[in-house]
Image (spheres, rainbow, N blue to C red):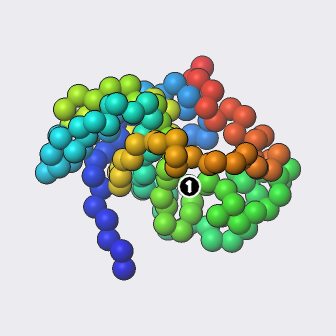
Amino acid sequence: MIEMEPIGTVRSPRGEVEDDNWGDVVSTIELRADLAAESLDGLDEFSHAEIIYVFDRVTQDKVVSEARHPRNNPDWPKVGIFAQRAKGRPNRIGTTITRIVKRTGRILEVVGLDAVDGTPVLDIKPVMREFLPREVVRQPVWSRELMANYWHTQK
């Protein structure tokens, strides 16, 4: 058994899980009280951070381990849960690369975090070019269609 305790909580204007329009969402991550504010020292020297969080609103009955159509769209092929980034995955872990706006004490402000208000954060990592793919990224057409409006700004 692996046990983890969240390091903080997302504060977001979005309280409901939605599939699209996350591009201009400004959120903060508040560290939990027993973590030193200095644990964020130096992070604001980076342009981006990877946020690792828990899809805590996904109930066990919504977890998928078999193949399914992404977003239940029959126009897209059935693929395994590990071939998509859906929230109903076995360990309900999400990751997103966000743009860092600023850090104030124990609070990190970011743009483009696709996590709703109250989401538990497991970890924060700086994005370093050396950890990004060193080759051309390949992906199927259906995934580009699925993501077409994901990072659009809210209407």
Location of residue 22 by image quarter: top right
Q: Within 10 angstroms of label 1, few (less than 14), some, or many (20 or more) residues?
A: many
Q: Amino acid at mark 1?
A: Lys
For image coordinates 28% across by 47% down, the residue present is 8
In-front residue for pair 9/49: 49
Q: Position of residue 5 (x, y in %)?
A: 28, 61
Look at the image and tell me in which quarter the C terminus lies. Answer: top right
The vertical placement of 87 against 98, above or below, is below
Q: Secondary structure at mark 1?
A: loop
In-front residue for pair 10/100: 100
- Along the horizontal axis of the image, is 7 left or right of 132? left
The vertical placement of 70 against 41, above or below, is below
One can see residue 109 in this view: no
Name the outermost residue toward the right.
75
For image coordinates 36% across by 74% down, the residue present is 2
Location of residue 13 by image quarter: top left
For image coordinates 36% across by 79% down, the residue present is 1
Q: Which residue is mark 1?
A: 87
- Along the horizontal axis of the image, is 112 left or right of 67? left
- Along the horizontal axis of the image, is 146 left or right of 92? right
For image coordinates 68% across by 32% down, the residue present is 149
Q: Position of residue 32 (x, y in %)?
A: 21, 47
Q: Position of residue 116 (x, y in %)?
A: 44, 41
One can see residue 30 in this view: yes
